Amino acid sequence: MTTLLERARNGLPLGIDIIDIHGHLGRSLFTIPDVSPESLIRSMDRLGVRRIVCSHMRAWSHDAEHGNAQMLKFMRTFPGRILGYVSVYPAAAQTVWERVERWLAAGFIGLKLHNSNGFPYDDAAYEPAWAMADERRLPVLLHTWGAEGEFGQIRSLAGRYGGAALLLAHAGVHGEAEYVRIAEECPNVHLELASSQTPRGLVERLVAAGLTERIVWGSDASFLNQAQQLGKVVGADIPEEAKVQILSENPRRLLDRASKAGEKP
Amino acid sequence: MAVELFDVQTGILGARPGERSVATAEDLVSTMARTGISGAVVRVAPADSEGDWTFSNRKLYEACAKHPELVPCPVVVPNSGEDFASEEEQVAEAISRGAGAAWVRMEADHWVVAEWLSDRLFGALTERRLPVYVAAGSLSPTGLAQLAGSFPDLPVIYAEVGYRDQRILLPLLERFGNISLSIGKNYRVQGGIEQSVRRLGAGRLLFGSGFPDAEPAGAMMQLLYADIAEDDKRQIGSGNIRRLMGEIRR
């Protein structure tokens, strides 16, 4: 049997049901040569990525609604391949509630919140979104950068909304020890690996800390190169089973628990 | 047959403040073996705690002497302060010790690219066709354009570029045919290799991993899964750097 690294060394699809938990569609301020969903699907096919969960590049702006509408089109063009996170701008709690409710009903499967908009994750206007995520057991992908204040907010939210799965994007890019600590303390916190830096040894250290079941892989594509981001797990010096858990089993479990919570009795 | 990979962007024996250990030549070689990388151009890096580049060059030569798959990339500096060997002697020594490139670190070694300061060094490198490794953080694109334009026969390896720089890189490489681009850390452009090959041809990109900072399988997969021809992958993987090293006037 060939290993994932051996398959990668030969440029072959990896042969497992990979789920990319962190993607984006739409333009950015810098050049991304092809931002079309078709291009992203071709990249996924070359690698063997079955599904990607995306938010739109406008996720953290006042234009989040435009982004959600664009995302819905892409989700309908590629059903089952491109899944969507709802993004909301925290203008007011009532608006957040209405928008999240509407987009979830349309088929989005979770939330993506980004603090580059200047609002902390525990801002009062986000409360209805957190309540829905809690009730429906949704994944909530949070942009994080190891900043001091972020961990306090996340700790508090993870405790208050135990049904939600909090996915900390860019885990370990800064403040690695704090990411490990919060994952140990909060059973509904998960560590997502996307970062341009691809630090050598990070995946090995997180696995050695006993967190294999709490790590999920995301590429940040098309913001970053999807194949390159996959390399940090495929090339890591960890057991083959751990790679399969991170790339496939852990994210599938998170998506399954959300869809089961959404089933009508 | 698998695409051969020869890594142009690696470092050993250097550390950043706060790091308790350094990556050794043995660490690099074992990582290369695990990921199927056949050779590497190697520097003493990270160089944040560097104090004497002549000492580091000696360390580098000794480490590479034990591992034939490692090709040294020593530091060279202008001898404008009359504190080192002449520029021609530095280049000659590097070549005699098997160097595949030389590293210029303007900010770290306290010099600038200017006709009145650095032309003798770049002239000596050009004379021997020894590729020069330039990190993006040490020279702006406009500075690099000035250098590449002044020395059109000097092979330049531009490395450690950002994933947000594609808008700058494409015209820079189009204008200056003597610049090659390493795809190692931190060139993470989705579709970037494909676009660069379409605009520039496959002869201008070089496989680099970013070891020890980055996991080498990242750059490896970025190349091997790119939507380009297998022959293009072979050029980028190893053909281009082997050609550049083959043109060194030894």
Image (cartoon, helix red, strand yellow):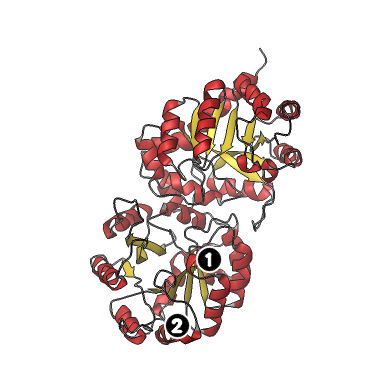
State the residue position of label 2: B118
Q: Secondary structure at mark 1?
A: helix
Residue at 57% from the left image edge and 77% from the top image edge: B176
Distance, label 2 to label 1, CA atoms, is: 35 Å
Label 2 neighbour load within 10 Å: few <14, some 14-19, many 20+: some
Q: Amino acid at mark 1?
A: Asp
Q: Secondary structure at mark 2?
A: helix
Residue at 54% from the left image edge and 69% from the top image edge: B202
Above or below A17: residue A157 = above
Residue at 29% from the left image edge and 52% from the top image edge: B21
The quadrant the N terminus of chain B occupies is bottom left
| A158 or B103, nearer to the observer | A158
**Res B228 → quadrant:** bottom right
Chain for disc number 1: B
Above or below A71: residue B59 = below
Q: Is residue B83 visible?
A: yes
Above or below A117: residue B151 = below
Q: Nearer the viewer, mark 2 or mark 1?
A: 2
Q: Position of residue A48 (x, y in %)?
A: 54, 43
Tags 2 and 1 touching, CB below 8 Å: no
- Count the labels in the image: 2
State the residue position of label 1: B232
Chain for disc number 2: B
| B206 or A46, nearer to the observer | B206
Sooner in the amino-acid sequence: mark 2 or mark 1: 2
